[in-house]
Image: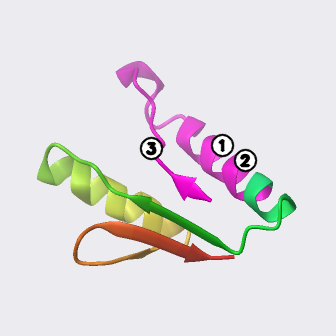
Amino acid sequence: MNISDIGVLNDEAKSRGYGDLLMVTALEIAKSKGASIVTGNMIFESSEQRNRQINYYSKYGFQIDENYKLKLVL
């Protein structure tokens, strides 16, 4: 499974758990379909956004390499 982007576009909706709900659901679907690895690429416009993404993906156990590529072994 490859994650393209997980995000909430509306500033009022940020920090309400919608991104977590999306991620948990995506990982559950990946497991139910027999996926063994989830990959993706971080895309960010600022260092603040990069740091938020690093914290977010790390919370779910993703490894993040020097090119901001994501990998999670299920």
- Of tags 3 and 1, the one toward the viewer is 3
Residue 22's x, y, as percent? 63, 42
Name the quadrant containing residue 37: bottom right
Query: Which of labels 1 and 2 is toward the front?
Result: 2
Element assignment for label 2: helix
- The amino acid on which the numbered mark 3 sits, given as a three-letter code, is Asp
Residue at image location 50% in from the left, 67% down from the top: 59
Q: Return the residue at label 3.
A: 5
Residues drawn in magenta: 1-28
Instruction: Using the numbered discs, state the Cα–Cα distance from disc 3 to disc 1 in whole angstroms.
Output: 14 Å
Residue 53 image point, x, y percent: 35, 55
Q: Which residue is drawn at the image coordinates 62% and 59% (left, top)?
A: 1
Answer with left or right where residue 33 lies relative to residue 74: right
Looking at numbered disc 1 in the image, what kind of residue is underneath it?
Answer: Leu
Mark 3–mark 1 CB contact (< 8 Å): no
Secondary structure of the residue carrying tag 1 is: helix
Q: Is residue 11 above or below residue 23?
A: above
Name the disc covering residue 25, or none. 2
Q: Check residue 55 for magenta coloring.
A: no
Earlier-in-chain disc, 3 versus 1: 3
Residue with the mark numbered 1: 21
Which of label 3 and label 2 is nearer to you?
A: 3
Distance CA(mark 1)–CA(mark 2): 6 Å
**Quadrant for the C terminus in the image:** bottom right
Secondary structure category for the residue under label 3: loop
**Pointers 1 and 2 in contact (CB under 8 A)?**
yes
Kindly identify the amino acid type of the residue bearing the numbered disc 2: Thr
Viewer-proximal residue among 10 and 63: 63
Q: Which mark is residue 72?
A: none
Asked if the magenta segment contains residue 19, the reply would be yes
User: Which comes before the other along the chain, label 3 or label 2?
Assistant: 3
CB atoms of marks 3 and 2 within 8 Å: no
